[in-house]
Image: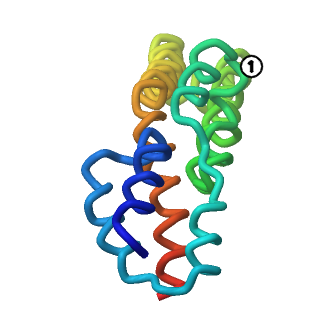
Amino acid sequence: MDNEKIQNYLLSNGKYLPMNEIGLLASKMQLIEDEILIFRIFSVRFWNPITFTLLYWLCPGFSLIDRFFIRSILSGILKSIFMPLVILILSIDFSTTTIITSLLGTIGGSILILLSWTIYLIWIIIDGFTINRRVRNYNLTQINRLIGSLI
């Protein structure tokens, strides 16, 4: 592939990719000779990191499903299903004086619930600040997979 096509492609799609990986991606793209393969690379659609960031901060429900979009399934399940379920179980268990309150007492149970909520909220806030980078890395992985299968 000639340098002009590569540069035009990277100029128009560089905003969707990590800046420190664009040079390596350009060198990989130069190894491709076939025009049909080049067309397949040019037809790759990327997720927009800015759209993800805005959705994350403006739509509260999106923070529960963002990881599924970038194919991080295990951490998506952990974040959207497991952690709220654990917090719910702790809250129900705490309110019905059973195992946790008998082991930790009333104050210990309250601290455990507060600690669980705090960890979960910190996780959501950190994800809000790192979603841009994660979407860019997902886009890079997507195009690297395609280039790797073509070379």
**Dot 1 alpha-carbon crowd within 10 angstroms: few under 14, some 14 to 19, many 20 or more:** few
Residue 33 higher or lower than 49, as above or below: below
Q: Is mark 1 on a helix, strand or loop?
A: loop
Q: Where is residue 38 in the image (x, y as percent from the top left)?
A: 56, 74
Residue 124 higher or lower than 9, as above or below: above
Q: Where is residue 145 in the image (x, y as percent from the top left)?
A: 52, 73
Residue 15 higher or lower than 8, as above or below: above
Q: Position of residue 29 (x, y in %)?
A: 40, 72
Observer-nearest of 117 and 58: 58
The residue under label 1 is: 96
**Residue drawn 55% across and 86% down?**
34
Regarding residue 112, the answer to whether it shows in the image is no
Observer-nearest of 52 and 5: 5
Residue 36 figure quarter: bottom right
Residue 21 horizontal side relative to residue 54, left or right: left
Q: Where is residue 121 in the image (x, y as percent from the top left)?
A: 50, 20
**Residue drawn 65% across and 53% down?**
45
Colour mapping: rainbow
**Residue drawn 45% across and 21% down?**
125
Total number of numbered labels? 1
Q: Which amino acid does label 1 sit on?
A: Thr
**Residue drawn 41% across and 33% down?**
130
Q: In which quarter of the image is the N terminus?
A: bottom left
Residue 3 higher or lower than 30, as above or below: above
Regarding residue 82, the answer to whether it shows in the image is yes
Observer-nearest of 32 and 58: 32
